[in-house]
Image: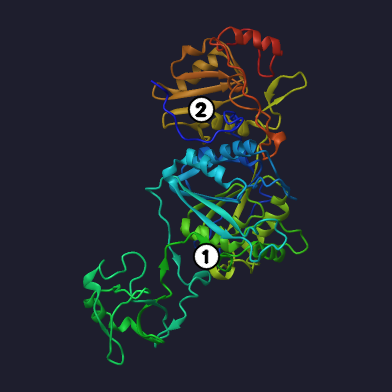
Amino acid sequence: MAKKQKLELTWVGKENRPRLEPRILLEDTERSFHADYRVRDDDIFDNRLIFGDNLLALRALEQEFAGRVKCIFIDPPYNTGSAFQHYDDGLEHSIWLGLMRDRIELLRHLLSDGGSLWITLDDNEVHYLKIVCDELFGRNNFVTNAIWEKSDSPRMDARFFSTRHDHILVYAKCIERLIINKVDSNADGAASHYDKRDENGRPYYLKPLRAMGAEDSRSDRPTMYFDMKAPDGTGVFPVRKDGSDGRWRWKKERTEKDRHLIEWVRGRTGWTPYYRIFGDQQSSRPPETIWVHSEVGSNRTSKAEIKTIFDGVKAFDTPKPERLIHRVLTIATNPGDLVLDSFAGSGTTGAVAHKMGRRWIMVELGEHCHTHIIPRLKKVIDGEDKGGVTEATGWRGGGGFRYFRLAPSLLETDKWGREVIAKTYNAAMLAEALCKIEGFTYAPSDSVYWRQGYSTERDFIYVTTQTLSQQQLAALSEEVGPDHTLLVLCSAFRGNGAAWPNLTVKKIPNHIRERCEWGHDDYSLNVENLPKAPPAAAPADADSAPETSARSARGQSLFDFGGDDQ
């Protein structure tokens, strides 16, 4: 039987996947920042700003935050072939697609079941990336492609068309669980068409009472063809533009019931009935797919915002206005929800999320993490940022964030070409890193030295750089007891590790050498940072005797001690 085929986009190197090292995150309290006092009871202080490669950072976040992020907004490099100041934005299509695919896979894993992913792109790659996202999310989880009017004026020097829009692809983790918030009909100038007010000052606009569009003829709904009395007493029937009989939107009974909503307008051809549609302050509407610059801002708007915040500092070439992010978070989140942006840029997503009372995580590799993002967030927290959506959100300052950087690679190569544990790792860092690699939650016990992490309530992990003797392992097995199991990772051990059923004993770094790509610190969207080629398949008996000869060929490892260890 032929293999079942599927619709997919293929490209050169699609099968290549990076083997990412699950790094730990190290907090730098000198760069973390919090308000001096609590402004509101719901102030959020545990937001995270991560400095480092975003692919490695997403892998680092995976264990703790998988299934917890409500909204992910990313503004990745557009692959336009242009050179931008803060990052290189030009790659061959297949390379760009592969690098984006790797990130979106991790982003999907971080989303909650009711969460959504929002991606801004232009015409260069949006249609290709949509197919990739269809493959990763399932085509049924595609929500919409919103159009943002990024330019508020035409480019007169355009060769063909003056491009004035970008795309915003929206995907749900699970479309059945997705809840989309409505938007305020009076927000962002959206209520400009409510151009009339009644005697009580309520805004409204008029809509013709005659049915228009499909099924608007008398024959479609005969009972909705009748005469209505105009203010001068004349009878008015619904008439289509071609002079044929039409029909009303309402039945005769409703025209009597809602007579107070009907407004007559006299034109050259006589009286025409309209009805009022009110736009109260509490009114809302479903979000639309055309986002004009007058509602959410343009590139010009965002550049002005950045210049206001960073006086004398060169602004980004393509920042996003705060009102655009505000629209996204209004639709996709509620107060307290977690928002992630792994292409933080100048930090707009975090700034807006902070003002809206959302928790946030941002990742940025460029030095503008320090020159732009941190100063901007400090102004938000201190209440000194008066622009953007500050007034609309009623923001007065407060809260804070924690600054993290990615730990260096766990394994490094010494001067003899041997892979050894990096010298920068202390005992606590080593235990946390190995917990993450093994899928354990790092939670060192204050009273039981060997309980450094757990995978279940009965399964624990113990990490040590000691060489454990047979007597030490026997004593450890007795402490663990028959009701629990323990993974022991040590530099070396003597005796038969299988002698104790409740212990699994492994040597480090031998146990983890082939797990991932060690020492690969930069997977950014540059050709020179592509993933390494996958290693050749290991022989079937790789866990047996050949390990010794392979070790001998490399030279003795820093963690290989004694001649009779197992």
Q: Residue 166's quadrant in the figure?
A: bottom right
Compare marks 2 and 1 and give the one earlier in the sequence.
Answer: 1
**Left or right relative to 472: residue 4:** left
The part of the image, by quadrant, that contains residue 242 is bottom left
What separation in Å lies between label 2 and label 1 (alpha carbons)?
41 Å
Secondary structure, mark 2, is strand
The image position of residue 44, as x and y in percent, is 54, 57
Where, by quadrant of the figure, is residue 491 drawn? top right
Mark identifier at residue 40: 1
Which residue is at 38% across, 49% downward? 177
Depth check: 44 or 376 in front?
376
Badge 2 crowding class, 10 Å Cα cut-off, few under 14, some 14 to 19, many 20 or more, is many
- The vertical placement of 321 against 122, above or below, is below
Residue 376 location, x and y as percent? 67, 59
Residue flagged by tag 2: what amino acid is it?
Ile
Q: Seen in the image, is 503 located left or right of residue 422?
A: left
Looking at this view, is 8 or 557 the one in front? 8
Relative image position of residue 525 (x, y in whole percent): 67, 40
Q: Which residue is mark 2?
A: 461
Most extreme residue toward the bottom, as rendered? 232
The mark found on residue 274 in the picture is none
Give the secondary structure at mark 1: loop
Q: Is residue 316 above or below residue 508?
A: below
